[in-house]
Amino acid sequence: MNPPCGRCNKPVYPTEKINCLDKYWHKGCFSCEVCKMALSMTNYKGFEKKPYCTMHYPKTSFTIVTDTPENLRLKQQSMLNSQALYKEEFEKNKGKGFSVVVDTPEMQRVKKTQDQISNVSAVMLSDSFNIF
């Protein structure tokens, strides 16, 4: 018994048989799924057990996994945690009237400069009262 052709389902006789992609094909039926270009064993590409030419071979594209339900849930949860921590810190420092500033050498220079300006203003102000 001769096996059926992978394209036309007619029997394939041994003289015209091509065994490829787990199917038997007539030489004339072994062609690209899209453009019907005749293919051989050297120039075909198989995808889902169907022959394709190089030009029409389906490209596998990768999906973006950032929008999966689990990732969306994790993103929302981290956003809520971030907002909760920010609000907690805000409420803790709300009535103090100041915010924490790191005491770096640059900040020390700025503070010293402001103190000097303040002292100069106070000296000038007191000198102006002494003139009269």
Image (cartoon, grey):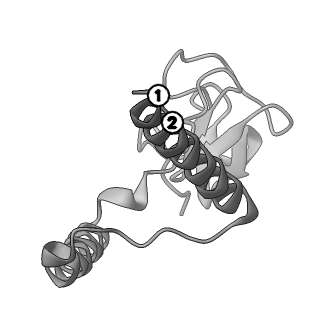
Q: Position of residue 35 (x, y in %)?
A: 53, 15
Q: Amino acid at mark 1?
A: Ile
Q: Nearer the viewer, residue 85 or 118?
A: 118
Q: Amino acid at mark 2?
A: Asp
Q: Residues within 10 Å of mark 1 (few under 14, many from 20)?
A: few
Q: Residue at image x 24%, y 66%?
A: 72
Q: Residue at image x 39%, y 27%?
A: 132
Cα–Cα gap, marks 2 and 1: 6 Å
| Residue lying furthest right | 42
* Residue 90 vertical placement versus 129 (above, below): below
How many labels, in total? 2
Q: Is residue 18 visible?
A: yes
| Residue lying furthest front | 132
For residue 131, which numbered disc appears in the image?
1
Q: Position of residue 8 (x, y in %)?
A: 42, 36
Q: Nearer the viewer, residue 58 or 25?
A: 58
Pointer 2: what residue? 127
For residue 25, which numbered disc appears in the image?
none
Q: Are marks 2 and 1 in contact (CB under 8 Å)?
A: yes
Q: Quarter-wise, where is residue 109 in the image?
A: bottom right
Q: Is residue 80 visible?
A: no
* Residue 71 vertical placement versus 11 (above, below): below
Q: Residues within 10 Å of mark 2 (few under 14, many from 20)?
A: few
Q: Position of residue 75 (x, y in %)?
A: 29, 69
Q: Position of residue 48 (x, y in %)?
A: 51, 53
* Residue 114 vertical placement versus 107 (above, below): above
Q: Under tag 2, what secondary structure? A: helix
Q: Nearer the viewer, residue 12 or 88?
A: 88
Q: Under tag 1, what secondary structure? A: helix
Q: Residue at image x 53%, y 58%?
A: 3
**Comparing labels 2 and 1, the label whose residue is closer to the camera:** 1
